[in-house]
Image (cartoon, helix red, strand yellow):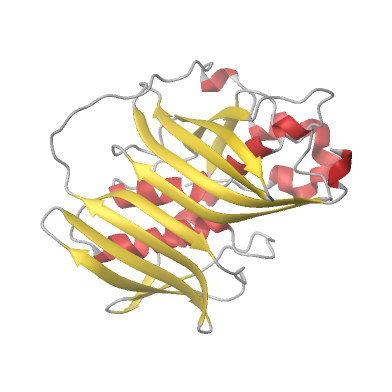
Amino acid sequence: MNPAIETLLDILNITQVDDCVFMGESPNDRRKRIFGGQFVAQALMAAGRSSLHEHVHSLHGYFLHAGDIDKPVRYEVNCIKDGKNFSNFQVTAFHDGKPLFVLLASFHNQENGLSHQLPMPDAPNPLSLPTITERMKPWETKLGDWNYRLRPFDQRFVEPPNIQIYENPRQPRQKLWLKAYDVLPDDPLIHASAFAFASDSTLRDSVLLPHKLSTLDSQLRIASLDHSIWFHRPFRCDDWFLYDQESPVANAGRALTKGHIFTEQGLLAASVVQEVLIRVDNLDEH
């Protein structure tokens, strides 16, 4: 199995230590702080392992404090509602009694109903696009080990990412294909949680495109404030899916980002919304 996939599955393999308490570990990937997608994914796993309903349909999370990768995270689950068709949970992540992240998640039994969706945007075949390492090669000196780190997901940007500072601003929108590098277990919760992990990694990048800013800029300080996902239908993260992302507004130090997930067959599988705190030193120059 791909080593990065093994690491991802280790992250998702939280340990139950009490009826409503789980412990999660962090990978040794040289991050100083716990990646936000890890909080979302592990909290979702804790909620899902506590639910009798098979499919998560929505989650809403708030990032409160940074987490230390050298400490295990304690996830406490509170069942708010356990009904016939829906169950709702609150999950709080702690370090030494200090809350780091709060998640609300709702689970639903699949049922028949009305069906429509937005059309899938045009995008080239993912295999025709450069890999993330190929895409970032011109900046490999600045990126250092980051460009060669093990990643659980193959990322294929449709347009060049915002790491390059452009002479002209671009629209705050980008598309990329993603696919797990190896086959994942058939558990729907694993796939939902794996996507939750990946969903936080590129969403904020679209905010920078209209402002000719790059993720390498030292004057940038960005932090996720909250994160929401609606799962419209189950989908597999070891198949290609298109992540269509945009930032409709930025103001007062905050920016909103949105994403739609389409399967390779054109089905709209999930929607994501995130608000980020974004501060720029020497803002008048931009």
Q: Nearer the viewer, residue 84 or 11?
A: 84
Q: Nearer the viewer, residue 14 or 50?
A: 50
On the picture, is 284 further left or further right than 149?
right
Residue located at (35% from left, 34% from top):
269
Residue located at (52% from left, 17% from top):
123
On the picture, is 66 further left or further right than 107?
right
Q: Nearer the viewer, residue 102 or 126?
A: 102
Residue found at the far front of this picture: 252
Residue located at (37% from left, 53% from top):
59
Residue 94 position within the rendered picture, expressed as x and y whole percent measured from the top left: 49, 76
Residue located at (49% from left, 54% from top):
8
On the picture, is 229 further left or further right than 94?
left
Q: How many marks?
A: 0
Q: Is residue 4 above or below residue 51?
A: above
Residue 248 visible in the snapshot: yes
Residue 74 position within the rendered picture, expressed as x and y whole percent measured from the top left: 45, 76
Q: Is residue 249 above or below residue 6?
A: above
Q: Is residue 170 above or below residue 182?
A: above
Which picture quadrant has residue 17?
A: bottom left
Q: Quadrant of the C terminus?
A: top right
Residue found at the far left of this picture: 84
Residue 281 position within the rendered picture, expressed as x and y whole percent measured from the top left: 84, 51
Residue 13 position within the rendered picture, expressed as x and y whole percent measured from the top left: 40, 63
On the picture, is 80 further left or further right than 239?
left
Q: Is residue 194 above or below residue 116?
A: below
Q: Nearer the viewer, residue 233 or 168?
A: 168
